[in-house]
Amino acid sequence: AAFHKFIGGAQSFLPEGNRAFWREAQHLPHVPTCVLRGVLEEHTTPESLDMISNLLSKQSGSALHDSQVHVFDAVGHPVYTMNRNGKILENCDMGGSVQRTHHWSPLSDEVEFVRTKRDEERASFECAKDRHVFPWVDVNARFGIIKYSNPSQEAS
């Protein structure tokens, strides 16, 4: 059932689930990690994220979040769990710039069932989706993980 899947996925938020996740994770020490850090704006926040956004603002004492992840926690390594995997990821973390966006901005068809008239009027889900991918592609190309293509070789 959908509810069971939802609750099952929430186990990683609990301390034991978090420890298990980072204990079993496997990371390479030479692969760069980058993130997209978002801070939402009231005039583009989807109506379905209003409540959770307000809760996170009250809980953290700051509105610097994308409705689900605080900007200071939006890093490419674990913040609250310290172990070998976390240290590897922290050393590989290239950081990321802060963008005006909300947590669900990469989604379109997946959020159709919660899209409201207000969301349509404000174009809450209408953004360049590729901006979520290309910072990762750039970092990996810059460090040789993804090879640049040579157009002259492709033509032959």
Image (tube, helix red, strand yellow):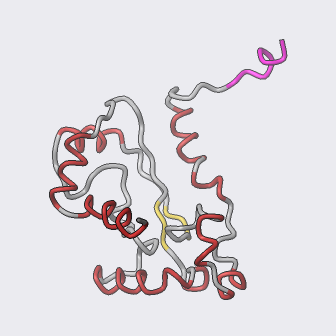
To which quarter of the image does residue 41 belong? bottom right
Position of 88 with respect to 134 (left or right) is left
Position of 80 with respect to 39 (left or right) is left
**Residue 46, image x, y percentages:** 57, 80
Q: Residue furthest front?
A: 1
User: Image point 48% across, 66% down: which residue?
Assistant: 38
User: Image point 23% across, 40% down: which residue?
Assistant: 24
**Residue 154, image x, y percentages:** 78, 18
Position of 120 with respect to 73 (left or right) is right
Q: Main secondary structure of the magenta part?
A: helix
Q: From the viewer's perspective, is residue 92 above or below residue 43?
A: above
Q: From the viewer's perspective, is residue 86 above or below residue 144?
A: below
User: Image point 59% across, 61% down: which residue?
Assistant: 106
User: Image point 38% across, 68% down: which residue?
Assistant: 69
**Residue 131, image x, y percentages:** 62, 55
Q: From the viewer's perspective, is residue 113 above or below residue 25?
A: below
Residues rendered magenta in the picture: 149-156
Position of 5 with respect to 129 (left or right) is left
**Residue 9, image x, y percentages:** 33, 60
**Could you tell me which quadrant the N terminus lies in?**
bottom left
To which quarter of the image does residue 53 belong? bottom left
Q: Examine the structure image and report whether residue 141 is included in the region drawn in magenta.
A: no
- How many discs mark residues in the rendered view? 0
Q: Residue furthest right?
A: 155
**Could you tell me which quadrant the C terminus lies in?**
top right
